[in-house]
Amino acid sequence: MRLVIVSNRLPFTVQEKEGKIEFEQSSGGLVTGISAYLDHLKTLNTMEYVWIGWSGGSVKERHYDEVRKRAFSEYNSYPIFISERSMENFYYGFCNKTIWPLFHCFPTYAVYDEDFWDYYKKVNEIFCKSIIEILREDDILWIHDYHLMLLPKLIREIYTDLPIGFFLHIPFPPFEIYHLLPKKWRTEILECILMANLVGFHTNDYAQNFLRCVLRLLGLGHDLGNISFSNRTVKVDAFPMGIYYRKFFETANSAKVQKEKENIKKIFKSAKIVLSVDRLDYTKGIINRLQGFELFLEKNPQWHGKIVLLLIVVPSRTGVESYQRMKNKIDELVGKINGKFGSIEWLPIYYQYKHLSYENLVSLYAASGIALVTPLRDGMNLIAKEYIATRTDKTGVLILSEMAGAVKELAEAIIVNPNHKEEIAQALKEALEMSVEEQKMRNDIMQKRLSNYDVVHWADDFINELMKLKEQRINFARKLLSSSEKIRIIKEFKNTNSKLILLDYDGTLVSFKDHPEKASPDENIIKILRILSETKGTDVVLISGRDRNTLQNWFGDINISLVAEHGFWIKEKGGDWQLIKPLTADWKPKLLSFLKLYTDRLPGSFIEEKEFSLAWHYRKADPELSSIRVKELMDDLISLTANIDVQILQGNKVIEIRSLGINKGTAAAYFISKNKYD
Ligand code: F6P
């Protein structure tokens, strides 16, 4: 078994500098998490793996071979080369100007451009083509993130039984925001993701948002996160991504980092260090954070000269204008705050715009008494978790935004609303005044939690669940007739003198439609029924819940028997319609007026009135409101019909009320007992 990881970003980004190829380390949560897990797999040597993704930067064709070789030998990776133009529209365009702002609930930043969408589809297809060249039948495929949401379907079209997992590393937005995407895009994205076997999110809130969008936009409900779609079951669940806890803890304890930590402390002359590290992104709330820090300095002059904000901003997506605008704003605000409060001896903010090596980062964590992590919206945020893991003596205070996915596991941090600068200023004060015992008590709880559910646990959990679903699928798979079985049935059919064929109609001979009238039989069905009816020694019975007039119109001139209204009416071959037994429907007027009330309360629902039954259809109604109304109606019907001889049935988007004692089974038994069939 081999694990095939696919993501847009690989652990390296290839750059061409002065005609030479350079491999630089990529940044971001996805790369950090997956790299850590794959490093772990490498040490275990139990599962083979490969990582497929975009090469990063633009690479000239003459360097392809060199990049491929290095990528494979050093990273077990297969790079995909994508033209600058495609990346402009796909990555900088659809991914980062449409999906990223929308999914992070910044709808005003979102751009809806048809070309971007076309390139998004095109690049997903390029990924698919490259993957199938590498994929083997017994692989497990794990697709990551918002860049590749169409991929599960593209791969599924070729590999029908491959275990495919999809994990989204950013938030999934509430329905009201997701709904802003053009109709075609929003349904296609959902339908493509649902072709995976397992769909994972960082938090249960995101999973619930996704399930609600699936219900509202595709009309598909779920059962404990399981959705039936396209003849398969897809599971949707939350898997909060962890960090490589042990590695961070051990690195922080290493002599090198300890030395570096002391150096940093010396540089800042024992001032309390507040650390802020992020990729440059408007979702990270860097401006709000600076405003919070400014307010803190305004309100707390006693801390001037005794505190420093270490602001590290990691360059990213420099091709997107909103990112450049934000960088300018940060530069200005840092200058303003330093000018307003600083002096020759003390600079309140120490600002760096650069990439950090792993050890540099850990040294900064270790040297900082406070970590200020206040994104406006963040799928998870691993910085918060990494900071806690490096607190080897258990001191230190984490200030964390309630908008980060990580807050669900780090409830002992000081939690703030990042939109409110007063809360940030107040949290800084509280952190500075927090006793060492209190710090240790809080960090101890968080460390235990993070070390238990680390990145290995996260990935193992996801993969094990995916494998479990594969087994279940094998066990519950619909048994299709093999060609030898088909041949045997045909042979026996031909050799038998007296045969009875019992057929259902809706959902069997025709698929369900918005309105029952639209589900009329096509020429082909009529032709097959005619052939069967003329086949020697063969009786055909069509048993339906439809009213007798409809059946008469559609099939009246074919020599078969018909059963209408689930068994109340029977028309034997060549005969007339007859009631199976004397019946009354005096209950109908009362229940009909009651159903009308519900029809008014659920737009899109309608009543189908038959002689001995009433059917209330809601296929076209709002799915969320339907599920509420259906529960209410069932409840009311049960008490209303307690003393009436009727039966209430819940079918596929329909509730049916009919007289008691007769059903399709009774009708079938009637025909079976009539003749001696072989
Ligand atoms: O999940 C979002 C993500 O892929 C993270 O891994 C990371 O924080 C960020 O986006 C990286 O963005 P990019 O690949 O655009 O540099």
Image (tube, grey):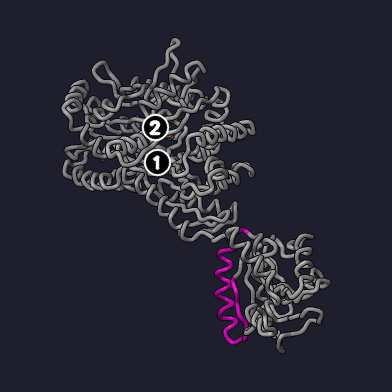
Q: Is mark 1 within 8 Å of ligand 1?
A: no
- Please, what secondary structure does the residue beneath circle 2 have? loop
Left or right placement of residue 287 versus residue 678 in this view: left
> Crowding near pointer 2: few (<14 within 10 Å), some, many (20+)?
some
Q: Secondary structure at mark 1?
A: strand
Q: Amino acid at mark 1?
A: Arg
Question: Going by the picture, which residue comes out furthest to the bottom?
Answer: 582
Q: Main secondary structure of the magenta part?
A: helix
Quadrant of the drawing holding the C terminus: bottom right
Q: In the image as oriented, which residue stretches furthest toward the right? A: 557
Residue receiving disc 1: 2
Quarter of the image that includes the N terminus: top left
Query: Residue 527's x, y, as percent?
Result: 79, 63
Residue closest to the eye, 365 or 79? 79
State how far apart marks 1 and 2 are (Cα). 25 Å
Label 2 beta carbon less than 8 Å to ligand 1: yes
Residue at the image position 76 percent from the left and 70 percent from the top: 535
Task: Mark 1: give few (<14), some (14-19) or many (20+) Cα within 10 Å.
Answer: some
Residue position for label 2: 28
Residue toward you, 150 or 370:
150
Labelled disc at residue 330:
none
What range is drawn magenta here? Answer: 622-650
What is the quadrant of residue 302 in the picture?
Answer: top left
Q: Would residue 145 be counted in the magenta stretch?
A: no
Q: Amino acid at mark 2?
A: Gly
Name the residue at 34% across, 46% down: 460
Give the foreground label among 1 and 2.
1
